Image (cartoon, rainbow, N blue to C red):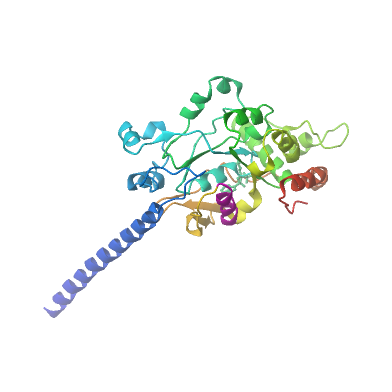
Amino acid sequence: MLFKQQVLLRQKLLVLGSLAIGSLLYLVARVGSLDRLQPLCPIDGRFGPRGQAEIPLRALQFKRGLLHEFRKGNATKEQIRLHNLVQQLPKAIIIGVRKGGTRALLEMLNLHPAVVKASQEIHFFDNDENYAKGIEWYRKKMPFSYPHQITIEKSPAYFITEEVPERIYKMNSSVKLLIIVREPTTRAISDYTQVLEGKERKNKTYYKFEKLAIDPNTCEVNTKYKAVRTSIYTKHLERWLKYFPIEQFHIVDGDRLITEPLPELQLVEKFLNLPPRISQYNLYFNATRGFYCLRFNIVFNKCLAGSKGRIHPEVDTSVITKLRKFFHPFNQKFYQITGRTFNWP
Ligand code: A3P
């Protein structure tokens, strides 16, 4: 009898304990999300009507959940009307550099409650056919957002395409421009690796990196090779500077974004005049992936796709040395122009 009572008591305690833990977990999740309800500083001095500075809970649920991207397809007409959602032209653009970590930067900035990302690369300014469709076409490609939020898009081809600076200037001469760079030789190899993987997927053969990067006739660096040209950051930046002052650019250290993302993101928050909202809580190192992943709250987190963080093929050290020597003077100029120095060899 006594034994039966003890078993019953134990069972009751177990149920009560589970309930308590469940409630606690629920509360933690709620507090995590409520934290994102705090009022936001206005962007570019734009105050919405009273009360609009707060993000309604429903928006929050979108932002933190799988439906956090307000794209035309997943925001109902009622939601758009109810929350005064709009499709805004970007106030900031990640213009490059390809393989610098542009996707990671966009996704990480999207952790900020005042930022809304355009998920796809839109290629409006670098693609003549898209550009001919006009600015309204571009705006309609943007996600839905609250008027006080800022939309950010990324298309790394913008950085190296001749016509783009003038076209962006015509859209908004005060747009903020983000450039994420990596050590130029590593970036070139990453660029090559992406193309190589594409060829392999189609069962095609491809040249070795060494063969493409070095001109076999002169044994010098092959400046006609696109992966090399893209890494001459200063050449491209100089074209942009014909339209925009250097203050309108912010250079992100893509190598540091891999190993220590938070301080890099905090610098971007500052540049965009955003209140600091991205915290270490939002970023956790995933040992299996070998990269930092994103945590929106206790329930929702994600890592970047497997196509980000490929294993690079081994490259002949003499070719690496040659490339590094080649990029060196361009890097010095880049440091001088941007005011940001890197420890690139
Ligand atoms: P690798 O594939 O050479 O490692 P982009 O998005 O511009 O194509 O850049 C891709 C690069 O982003 C990857 O290059 C990877 O190193 C880098 N990266 C930076 N942070 C990352 C993260 N948290 N997860 C995955 N890749 C990240």
In this view, the residue farthest toward the bottom is 2
In this view, the residue farthest toward the left is 1
Give the quadrant of residue 184: top right
Q: How many marks?
A: 0
181 up-or-down from 281: above or below: above
Q: Position of residue 228 (x, y in %)?
A: 75, 37
Secondary structure mainly formed by the magenta segment:
helix
Residues 333 and 166: in front is 166
Asked whether residue 126 is drawn in magenta, I would say no
Residue at x 83%, y 46% (from the top left corner) = 325
Instruction: Work out which quarter of the rendered image holds the N terminus and state it.
Output: bottom left
Give the quadrant of residue 33: bottom left
Residue at x 22%, y 67% (from the top left corner) = 16
Residue at x 60%, y 28% (from the top left corner) = 170
Residues 126 and 7: in front is 126
10 up-or-down from 185: above or below: below
Q: Position of residue 122 (x, y in %)?
A: 54, 30
Left or right: 175 as drawn, with respect to 317: left
Left or right: 210 as drawn, with respect to 301: right
20 up-or-down from 185: above or below: below
Residue 304 in sight: no
Left or right: 340 as drawn, with respect to 325: left
Question: Which of the four quarters of the rendered structure image does ligand 1 lie in?
Answer: top right
Residue 30 in sight: yes
First to last magenta residue range: 262-272
Q: Position of residue 230 (x, y in %)?
A: 71, 36
Residue at x 41%, y 52% (from the top left corner) = 39
